[in-house]
Structure formats: C-alpha cells, structure tokens
Image: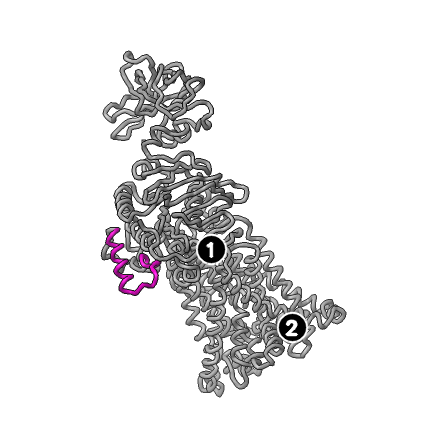
C-alpha cells in the first residue's frame, strides 16, 4: 500500500498556476525526495500535503484515508502528517523536552516523560531536555524538530529543505543522523530539496517537480541513467545535450555512432537529442581522437576537474563539458582530442522541449 | 510502521473556502465589534428620533463651523508635529550613539503616563497665557507624541540594517538614506501612531477645557450637561465622520508595499550613526522634549504642593480610597480590553479577508468618540434592556473604559502577533493539536509582551479618564481624576495638584514598564 498518494493535484494563487496536476506515490515506510528548482511549486505541494493550504483540485491520500479532496479537506491536526519546516521552528518559549512532548496526548506525566526521553535518546540528544532552543546548535535544533514530529507517530513525515540552513560541514552528518532515525522509526518520509546531490545520495525514490508537475519518479540510479526527458537530465547534473540521428539501436552524433541505452521506446529513426554526461567524455592527446577541440575553461574542484572544450568548427556556445580526475587538469588553450563513451540516452523529437543550455546546470 | 495505533475517530472532511474558516475566533470578534458599535448605534438612534428638521439648524449654525475649523486644524497640526517629534526622537534613541540611550528610552515614553489634563494644568499654572489654539497644540503635542514614538522605535529596532547598508553602497549619502530607506521602513509605524494621535485628539476633553479651547468634544460635553441631547448627538455624528476621514486617509496612505522584513528574525544590532559634533544638539533636543512634556507639569505640581501645604491639605484624606477605586476600575477594564483584542487580532492577521478588515478598521472608531458619548450609550442600552439595574455600577464603568480604549489594546496585540511566526502555529497543528489549544499554548505565550503592552496602555488611559467617569461613577465613590477635576474646577489648585501627583505616580509604574518592555520587545518575540 502507498503511504502517501497524490492524484491530479492543482493549485493556483490568483492568476499564477503553481501546481498543474501533480501525481505522486510514496511507498509506505520508504524515504522519498521531492526535487525541484526554487519556484517549481515544491513548498506549495508540501504545504497542501500538511493541510496548511487547500488544493483547488485533486486528491491526497494518506495510508488509505483521503485527507484532501479538493473541495473538502481535513484540518492539519487530524491528518497524522508530521511536518518539519526549514529552520526547525521550535517553540522558543518551551524547553526541548516540552517541545518534543508538545503533541503527546495527556497520557500521564510519567508516561510522557519516558516517551520524550526515549525520543531524545533516539535522535542522540539524551539529557538536553531542560535546554531552551536558542541554547542548541542548528543541527541539534533540526533533530529536536524531528523528534517532536516523530513523537505523535505520524503516518507520513514531511521535511522541508531540512538541511539547507546548515553549514556544508554539518550538513552531511546531520543528514546521516536524520536518515538513520527515520529508517529506524520506519516512517514514510517525503523530503523536499533543490539539491540534486542530496536527493540522489540519500533517497530511495526521487520525484522531480518541473513547472508544477512531476516530470519523473524513479530510483536515484534510474533517474540519473535513464532520465525521462532532456529537462530532467539537465536538472540532475551537468549534461551535454547533442543533436543526433537514430539509426536502429544506435544514434549518430558528431562522435560517430553510439549505443542507445534508453529510454525505452526510442523510435529507431529520425532526429534525436542525445545525452552525454561529462564523465562519458574522455579527453585524450590531440592525435588520438577523430574529434578535436580546444579547452576554453577549466573548473577545478579538487577531486575532479570540469573542462569546457570547444570542438573545432563549432561556436563557443556549443562547448562540451568533460569531467576528468583532478590530477589531469589541462591549461586553458590546450588542444585536445575528445572521445565519447557509450551507451547513451537519446530521445526522439516528441520528447519534451529541450531545457536551457547545459552550462546553466553545471554541478560538481 | 508508525500508522495510528489508537482507534481512529470517523474523519469528516470540512468544506474548504478561500481560506480556512475560524468559527470561534470570528464569532468572538463579532461580539466585540458589536459591543464597540453600541455608542454609534446610540447616536444614530438619537439622531433618527430627533429628525432632520430639528438637526439641520444645529448642524448648519455658525458655531458648528467654528468647532469644525478648530477641531480639524488642531488635529492636523498636532498629528503632524507628533509624527515629526516621535519619529526623530525614536531615530535618535535607536539609531545614533546618543549618550544614555536606555535612560532616554524610558524618559521619552513616560509622558504617555501623564494625563493630558495634568499637562495643561501644569502649563496654565506656569504661564496663564498658554491657552487657545497655540496652547492646545503645545500641550497636546508633548502629551501624546509617545503614541508615535513607541511603534516607530519598535520598528526601527526590527528593521534590517542591511537595507541601510545597501543604500549606502549604492551611493546614497546619510541623509538620502534616511529619507529613502529609514523613513520607508518606519512609514507604517508612523501612520499607525498618527492614527491613534488623531483619534485621541478628537476625543480629548479635560485638557481643552482647562486651556479654554473649544472643539467638538468640549461642546458635546457642554450640550449634554445642559440636557440638549439631540444637539449633542448631532455634533457627535459629525465627530464620527471626522474619525472616519482619519481612518480612511490612514488606510489610503498605507499603499501596497510590504514593510516586514523577509529575512528570518535574527536581527543584527542596528547601525548606530555617530552624532559627532551634533551630539550636544541631539541631547538638547531630547532634553527639551522631556522637559516640556514631563518637567513643566511635574515641576508645577510640586511647586504648587510646596506652596499650599502639600499632604496636610483637607483633600488628602480621600487620596487612599480614590487611588483604590481608580485601580479597581482601571485594571479589570485593561484586562477586558486586552482579552477582547486577542480574537480580533487573530482574525485580522491569520484569516485576512474583507470581513476581518471591516471588523478591525471599524473597531478604531470608538477611540475618536468623547467618553461621555460612550457612557451615555451604555446607560441608554442598559436602561432599555437591563431595566437600569447597572446604572452607576462598577461593572458599567469598567465596560465603558474597556470599550473606549479597546483600540490601544488591539494595536499592541496586533503588532506583537504580526511578529509571531505563523509557521510555529502550523507545526503545532500538524502535531495533532486543535486550533484553540495551539492559540493557548503557542500563540498567546509568544505574544505575551504585546498583551502586557496593551494592558498598560489601556490602564494608563483608564485611570486618567474623566467624562465617562463623571457620568458612570458609582454614588459616593471618587477616583483620582474626578477628585482632581472637582478641586481644579473649584479653584483649589493645591489640592488638585496633590491628586495630579498621585495620578502621575500611579501611571509612572506602567509607563516605566512600557518603556522597558518596548526596549526588549523584538528579542522577546523573535522566534525560530
């Protein structure tokens, strides 16, 4: 059974159409990410799920119970959906213990105290109960907010960009802790992020929200290797999108014929848009490749290097991204050979429109 | 799996409107607004029973025109002066390196605790020439500018200092930055404070009576005193129209922009401009304001007392019981007004819509009505529907105070609620707690400073109220202000001064608290 199911959700604010028929299903007990650029409608979607906003049309189902049917909706306090907002939003006038115990019904003081202690232990903050929120670090606040949401045993937990306010250093460790707690609690979790690395590295399922609709829902690996559209591909990391022509189970590009790995149902003939990830481009000595070009930019990231290479006879805007190991950095202006390593993903012309140039989505 | 372990109650999906409905808050607000509308209903009823043919000669006589001229020019001039004095004083305290700024923060608020009639009493004692329009402008400006100072100081402290920094980095000089950025940040606070000032001036009686300056309110009081109730009602309706004009022009000048800072509230300390060589000038200006607003009335009271024998005066015997009654009527009224302000503030900020706007705006009107109108309206309705059993009962007087000064409580509670993040309430509800419980456990504790400020403001005004008190005070009891008035009108200035001193002493406590709380307000309610 689905822990969370969203069908045809629509929402507009005055003349602005924010959600245009969102369909989404999260397996009970799994950890799913909702990935979208800022302005894609992901926070609105989360607020509708939590019950703070009403959908105009569509349905939200939590473990078999309809909680929002467009015209009719259940109040947030009756949905059993836990919500952890961006900055944690702890009640500043309550201690950590009272924050965590806030949602617990009056089941006897002793029982409540034991439950609170157990939850704090679970998030690794045992003994911090008497502190006030302002005495905690950002990561600790985040974990208290999580314990507070888990206290009422919600059917679903929503996390709104939970790690974006933390320093990069703290981020990874808090994320690991939170994930661990959620797995042990067996909660169905949906977390919103605009960071594709975060979504790909931690979620079991990633749904990409583009312009108010889900462009694709899949496992991280499938999403990265078989994106449903050039747009999704560009969003999930740096991408070279090249023109090509289908020819049976191959596609012809400037690099010659390459094997097509997906998505399924490629037409077998006609024009194609071909995805070549930067790590699929190999930079060689000039005379060892049929395609040659000049390095026009070099972005050094330490562990690896992203080179921008303009193939001979192409305009500067058509420069290709190639990722090579850090120690193989090449000075700008060097003449190099370029080799593409298949298999690649290619779409026919009926695939959704090509997204903005790959350079906009350059990522580490 | 963490699915509900307890048996689930049948779930009802509620019908969704544009926003979420709030039946409890809406109906509580409706009751408060209905109570606030009683004086208006009373005036309209009286005017209708009198009939247009009788009202017309009253409204279109020469006196009405001169009252209108007096009232309008006084309101405009004093409101403008208060806006300037209050804003500049707040800027000096909050945004410059003015020496002893914590002391000034309290001293500049304290005039709010000195009743207007005490200020004018002090001035008339000092310089009998202070009277008429000039005198009224002088006295009222320094008596009521704290209504502008308080909100402006609070919003200056909240404003994001980065905005000023950005302006400077874009090439604006300090003065251009002040005009185009700082003034913009506090514009709404200045407007809100000016609204209160204008309404308070429209309703002021005691100070103008002492200064012998005629406004609608003094004339209305005289008409009622001579039992010309229909004339008084007609004049009061004109006054209501003036209040409406004030409200509408304030609303119109608000404009569409938002002034709240978008960044999360972790305010950096504000930029403090170095006064440099202007420092003596700034100190002089602050001293002048405090001296004119506090020093003159206070000095005169003390010297009067010293000359006339002070506490040995015969009136001194009643000070204790008058003080007791003053507090006994003022405190419950302040409490009632503050409690009543909560649903209206919640409705207007958490459930915005046409209804809540109408509710909120209309509740300010009563501040511009003379106390005697509110008192007589309550007498009228209780005689009609409670067989007069409440007439001159403490309950009715307390109700009158609570209604008259309700807008002050609303302003304070609303300002505080506007800063309390909605997100905390949302989280609380998603934890399964119903709305009213969230209000009690999350919202109210967070707006506690605003509730305290609202209580103090209403209490301060209630203990100095005069005309409604004279009508509604229970037989054979006295309050400080009625005693002051009785001695003052009969020429016993020494004994009047004694009561003035006690009033000021009593008012200084919440006045001081206001100065201190406002100083801390943003940090007390900052959250997340």
Above or below, B6 relative to B202 = above
Label 1 belongs to which residue?
B12
Image quarter (top left, top right, bottom left or bottom right) of the N terminus of chain A: top left
- Do marks 2 and 1 share a chain? yes
In the image: residue B134, left or right of residue A172: right
Residue A111 highlighted magenta (yes or no):
yes
Residue A35 screen position, x and y as percent: 38, 38
* Disc marking residue A162: none
Residue A29 screen position, x and y as percent: 32, 45
Above or below, B476 relative to A262 = below
Residue at position x 50%, y 73% in the image: B462
In the image: residue B48, left or right of residue B428: right
Residue at position x 27%, y 54% in the image: A119
Image quarter (top left, top right, bottom left or bottom right) of the C terminus of chain A: top left
**Residue B96 occupies quadrant:** bottom left
Residue A344 visible in the displayed image: yes
Residue A280 highlighted magenta (yes or no):
no
Label 2 belongs to which residue?
B219
- Report the chain holding disc 2: B
Q: For this rendering, which residue is in front, A343 or B384?
A: A343
Residue A305 screen position, x and y as percent: 28, 27
Q: Residues within 10 Å of mark 2 (few under 14, many from 20)?
A: many
Question: For the residue labelled by badge 2, is the local secondary structure a helix, a strand or a loop?
Answer: helix
Residue at position x 35%, y 40% in the image: A33
Q: Magenta segment, which residues?
A: A99-122
Sequence-earlier tag: 2 or 1: 1
Q: Residues within 10 Å of mark 1 (few under 14, many from 20)?
A: few
- Report the chain holding disc 1: B
Residue B129 visible in the displayed image: no
For the residues labelled 2 and 1, the Cα–Cα distance comes to 59 Å
């Amino acid at each position: 059974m689905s822990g969370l199911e969203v069908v045809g959700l629509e929402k507009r604010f005055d003349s602005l159409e924010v959600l245009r028929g969102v369909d989404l299903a999260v397996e009970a007990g799994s950890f799913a990410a909702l990935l979208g650029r800022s302005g894609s409608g992901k926070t609105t979607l989360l607020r509708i799920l939590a019950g703070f906003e009403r959908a105009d049309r569509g349905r939200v189902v939590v473990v078999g119970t309809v909680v929002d049917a467009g015209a009719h909706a259940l109040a947030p306090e009756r949905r059993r959906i836990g919500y952890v907002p961006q900055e944690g939003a702890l009640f500043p006038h309550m201690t950590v213990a009272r924050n965590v115990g806030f949602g617990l019904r009056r089941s006897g003081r002793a029982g409540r105290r034991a439950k609170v202690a157990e939850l704090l232990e679970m998030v690794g903050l045992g003994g911090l109960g008497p502190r006030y929120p302002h005495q905690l670090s950002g990561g600790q606040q985040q974990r208290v907010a999580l314990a507070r949401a888990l206290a009422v045993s919600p059917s679903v937990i929503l996390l709104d960009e939970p790690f974006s306010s933390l320093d990069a250093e703290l981020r990874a460790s808090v994320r690991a802790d939170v994930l661990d707690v959620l797995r042990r609690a067996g909660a169905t979790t949906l977390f919103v992020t605009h960071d594709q690395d975060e979504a790909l590295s931690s979620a079991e399922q990633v749904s990409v929200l583009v312009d108010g609709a889900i462009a694709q829902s899949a496992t991280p690996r499938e999403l990265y290797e078989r994106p449903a559209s050039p747009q999704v591909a560009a969003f999930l990391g740096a991408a070279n999108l090249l023109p090509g022509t289908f020819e049976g189970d191959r596609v012809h590009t400037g690099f010659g014929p390459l094997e097509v790995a997906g998505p399924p149902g490629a037409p077998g003939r006609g024009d194609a848009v071909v995805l070549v990830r930067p790590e699929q481009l190999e930079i060689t000595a000039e005379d060892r490749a049929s395609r040659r070009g000049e390095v026009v930019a070099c972005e050094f990231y330490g562990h690896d290097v992203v080179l921008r290479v303009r193939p001979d006879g192409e305009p500067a805007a058509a420069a290709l991204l190639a990722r090579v190991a850090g120690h193989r950095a090449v000075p700008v202006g060097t003449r190099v050979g370029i080799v593409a390593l298949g298999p690649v993903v290619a779409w026919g012309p009926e695939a959704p429109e090509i997204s903005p140039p790959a350079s906009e989505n350059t990522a580490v | 799996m963490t699915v509900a372990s307890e048996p689930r109650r049948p779930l009802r999906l509620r019908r969704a409107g544009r926003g979420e409905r709030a039946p409890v808050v809406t109906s509580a607000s409706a009751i408060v607004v209905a109570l606030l509308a009683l004086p208006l209903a009373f005036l309209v009823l009286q005017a209708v029973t009198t009939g247009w043919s009788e009202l017309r000669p009253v409204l279109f006589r020469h006196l009405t025109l001169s009252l209108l001229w007096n009232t309008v020019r006084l309101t405009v001039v004093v409101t403008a002066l208060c806006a300037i004095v209050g804003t500049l004083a707040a800027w000096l305290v909050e945004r410059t390196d003015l020496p002893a700024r914590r002391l000034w923060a309290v001293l500049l608020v304290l005039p709010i605790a000195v009743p207007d009639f005490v200020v004018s009493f002090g001035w008339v004692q000092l310089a009998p020439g202070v009277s008429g329009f000039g005198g009224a402008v002088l006295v009222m400006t320094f008596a009521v500018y704290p209504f502008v100072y308080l909100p402006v100081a609070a919003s200056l402290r909240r404003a994001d200092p980065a905005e000023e920094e950005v302006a400077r980095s874009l090439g604006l000089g300090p003065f251009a930055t002040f005009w185009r950025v700082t003034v913009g940040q506090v514009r709404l606070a200045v407007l809100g404070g000016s609204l209160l000032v204008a309404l308070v001036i429209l309703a002021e009686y005691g100070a103008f009576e002492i200064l012998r300056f005629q406004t609608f309110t003094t004339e209305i009081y005289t008409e009622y005193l001579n039992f010309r109730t229909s004339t008084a009602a007609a004049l009061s309706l004109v006054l209501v129209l003036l209040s409406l004009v004030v409200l509408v022009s304030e609303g119109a000048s608000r404009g569409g922009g938002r002034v709240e800072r978008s960044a999360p509230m972790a305010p950096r300390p504000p930029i403090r401009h170095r006064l440099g060589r202007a420092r003596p000038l700034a100190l002089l200006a602050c001293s002048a304001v405090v001296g004119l607003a506090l020093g003159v009335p206070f000095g005169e009271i003390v010297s009067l007392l010293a000359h006339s024998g002070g506490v040995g005066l015969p009136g001194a015997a009643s000070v204790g019981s008058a003080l007791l009654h003053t507090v006994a009527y003022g405190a419950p009224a302040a409490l009632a007004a503050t409690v009543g302000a909560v649903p209206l503030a919640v409705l207007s900020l958490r459930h915005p819509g046409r209804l809540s706007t109408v509710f909120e705006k209309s509740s300010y009107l009563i501040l511009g009505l003379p106390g005697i109108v509110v008192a007589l309206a309550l007498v009228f309705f209780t005689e009609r529907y409670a067989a007069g059993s409440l007439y001159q009962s403490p309950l009715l007087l307390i109700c009158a105070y609570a209604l008259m000064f309700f807008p002050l409580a609303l302003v304070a509670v609303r300002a505080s609620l506007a800063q309390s993040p909605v997100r905390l309430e949302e989280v609380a509800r998603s934890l399964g707690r119903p709305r009213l419980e969230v209000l009690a456990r999350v919202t109210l504790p967070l707006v506690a400073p605003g509730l305290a400020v609202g209580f103090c403001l209403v209490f301060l005004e209630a203990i100095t109220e005069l005309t409604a008190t004279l009508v509604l005070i229970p037989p054979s009891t006295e309050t400080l202000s009625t005693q002051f008035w009785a001695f003052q009108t009969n020429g016993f200035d020494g004994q009047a001064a004694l009561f003035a001193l006690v009033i000021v002493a009593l008012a200084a406590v919440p006045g001081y608290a206001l100065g201190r709380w406002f100083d801390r307000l943003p940090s007390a309610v900052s959250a997340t």
